[in-house]
Amino acid sequence: MPALPKELLEKVAATKVLVVGAGGIGCELLKNLVLTGFADIEVIDLDIIDVSNLNRQFLFHKQHVGKSKAAVATESVLSFCPTANIKHHHNSIMSPEFGVSFFKQFSLVLNALDNRAARNHVNRLCLAAEVPLVESGSAGYLGQVSVIKRGVTECYECTPKPAARSYPGCTIRNTPSEPIHCIVWAKHLFNQLFGEADIDEDVSPDMADPEAQQKNGQEDGAVDQPAANGDAPQTNNSSSNAERMSTRKWAIDNNYDPKTLFNKLFNEDIRYLLSMSNLWKKRTPPIALNYDSLPDEHPGSSSSSSASSARGHAGSGIKDQVVWTPMTCRDEFDHAVATLRDQLSKKEDGHVLVWDKDDETAVHFVTACANLRAYVFGIPLKSLFDVKSMAGNIIPAIATTNACVAGMIVMEALKIVDGRIDATRSVFISRLPNPRGKILVDQIPDKPNPKCYVCSEKSEVFVKLNTNAFTVKQLEDKILKQTLNMVAPDVELADGSGTIIISSEEGETTALQDKTLAELKVVDGSRLQCDDYMQNFELSLIIIHCQDFKDGIDFIIITDIADLKPKEADEEMPKEEEDVECVVASEVMPPETVGLKKRRTADSDGPDTKRARISDQMGD
């Protein structure tokens, strides 16, 4: 390959680059950058090195396990290119210190991230700072690189991404039928016991399940309720029905005793579910487990008399792909609960544990709980590897794909540095060659979407919700943070009053969190002005009062005003079997076209081609 022109090499050496992520793609990217001539680099990554990273993140070795990825990657790169000026940050890119002013000091930002929230955040900061961004991602054998430049190309959020699938609470809590239902339940249980508890992630039997109503001649809506301590159920109309304590408080009162927890979760709660006879008319009923008499073998599992092998102390073969027996799951549950209890006790008051796919104890806890629940409901058990992949939404990463993606990033970066933004391309790695025999297919980037609420001049969205029931906390957590990807929102009524209903200043609006929007005079037609100082992002939220939602749907986000036009009744809401809790209207697409968009290839004057957008999926 011919050397770069001298003038371009000088530009490269003078370009200050920010690399966000030092994992699978990030390691390859840092190596490529210094070998190309980039000499002024800063890298940010919050993660520490796990032994599972070593098979593809070549800058890390066994002695680095447990250390900062950003720090070790910097050290490794400097070992073969000591003249480079590389600064590392072991921190989250979403920390307040990395705001617009921080981004403005760079000529170019290169993303090597592994989650959508961080990608959205960097996208918004680059737009605000007017710094070009090269986005990337890999998913197995597939990969993608795209260039984002304000006013020139579409931004990361111009094309709606398919929403992560969610499941009705009654399915998770009462009638699981797939392994993923049990895994979701187990992750909710982790948060209820050790993490940040969410009222929408309750793991106890769902007494409001409409399918369980009118059983055994009771009055409509009168369903037996289990006591928090697992005692005999009481009915809704019983005067002795006491308020249930939280799962966390109950666990603390019982000193997180593993056997007590086990009996509550896998025996007493299951016996209560069995009392809801309507649920089992057309389903196989679950079986309540006995802590002291669990089988040490099960179809598809590997018999083991000790859980030590599950933690890597014995046994041959690939231990993570072994399916534990119910007895091993119980032993792993005991060990994980004891360990997590000790970890939580060392936290300062008010601080909790956070589930992480790279935390061995947390993953063992979820695997054990998910498999025990699966055994209860006659669902196939899964290996630690499978549970980790499903719980972390992981598509296994492939080193060669990451290497290709990193090379593609640098090729697009060189065009930007050379001032040839019009020559940049969106590049995709395909699993199979196209009709021209190409695995790498490049396409002309799309222009900005004029209806994008992030990069268009008119940043506004409509939200349908029940103002009489929807609370301020739900608005902040479910809509602003989880759906619209804001980090530190401030919200005020845009009626001239200046009334602030959500503040990023801690404690300023805490008293308002449990109030409904209607109580704060947020009604049909109200406009809320939302501002995220960390992202330098402003958004108008127009409220549409609506009470006619199907079960499991709390709100609907609408980014295109045309979607507010009347539709046929059966088109207005998704069908019940779609298993969603909320819907982003602009993201509802037929399953076969989700994540696909028509694009014109750069090397052809022929018809438009479809190319999957996978930049929001990545194994590392």
Image (tube, grey):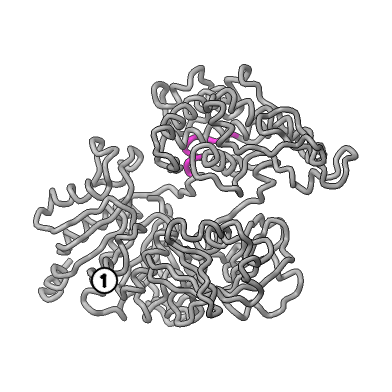
Left or right: 409 with respect to 9? Answer: right
What residue is at 72 percent from the left and 70 percent from the top?
Answer: 571
Query: Which residue range is magenta in the image?
Result: 381-389
Q: Residues within 10 Å of mark 1 (few under 14, many from 20)?
A: some
Residue 49: x and y in percent read 30, 42
Q: Residue at x 54, y 57 (%)?
A: 511
Say how many tags the image has.
Answer: 1
Task: Report the side of 425 relative to 613 (left or right).
Answer: left
The picture places residue 86, in percent across and down from the top left corner, at 17, 57
Determine the residue located farthest toward the right in the rendered image. 217
Q: Which residue is mark 1?
A: 104
Quadrant location of residue 584? bottom right
As rendered, which of 197 and 157 lies closer to the eye? 197
499 is within the stretch colored magenta? no
The image quarter in which residue 467 lies: bottom right
Residue 330 position within the rendered picture, expressed as x and y whole percent measured from the top left: 55, 25
Which three-letter amino acid code belongs to the residue tagged 1?
Lys
Q: Residue at x 65, y 60 (%)?
A: 554
* Element carrying mark 1: loop
